[in-house]
Image: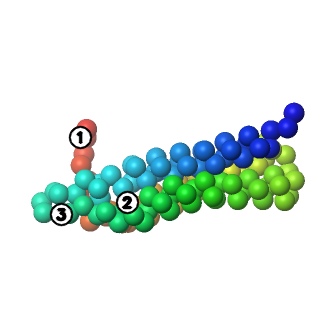
Amino acid sequence: METRGWAAVFAVLGGATVGFVVWGLGAAPGLRGDFEGEGKDFSLLWIELPLMLFGMPALALAVWALVAGVLRWREGVAALAVVGVLVLGAWGSTQWLESRTATVPRQEGPL
């Protein structure tokens, strides 16, 4: 049963989902703004959103192509490699967004 094409599609969809969720959670404080005269940081929309929305799927597809295509390892190993890279990418993106929105006061509790 040939699954390489569909598995690559799922890697890209997973990367896009991870990128959008991480951006949405990390950029929210900077997009809310307007706390004690603080403005909204729209560069989070113009720079970080495209980087995470297109960068994570590109990263996932590159890892899938390398592990499953070039190295010709099993698809299970390639899937684990993609998941591992997406976890590391999500962590790095979270750290980046936290440093970008560090000056914005965080709200505790529900909105």
Q: Residue at x 43, y 53 (%)?
A: 23
Front-most of residues 28 and 91? 28
Pointer 1 local density, CA inside 10 Å: few below 14, some 14–19, many at least 20: few
The residue at which mark 2 appears reads as 45
**Image quadrant occupied by the C terminus:** top left
In the rendered structure, which disc, 1 or 3, sits on the residue that comes first in sequence?
Answer: 3
Q: Secondary structure at mark 3?
A: loop
Q: Residue at x 77, y 44 (%)?
A: 5
Q: Amino acid at mark 1?
A: Leu
**Figure quadrant of residue 35:** bottom left
- Distance in Å between CA atoms under marks 1 and 3: 18 Å
Q: Position of residue 76 (x, y in %)?
A: 78, 42
Q: Amino acid at mark 3?
A: Glu
Front-most of residues 46 and 103? 46
User: Which is more foreground, mark 1 or mark 2?
Assistant: 2
Q: Is residue 60 left or right of residue 28?
A: right
The residue at which mark 1 appears reads as 111
Pointer 2 local density, CA inside 10 Å: few below 14, some 14–19, many at least 20: some
Asked if one can make out residue 91 in the rendered structure from this viewpoint, the answer is: no
The residue at which mark 3 appears reads as 38
Q: Amino acid at mark 2?
A: Leu
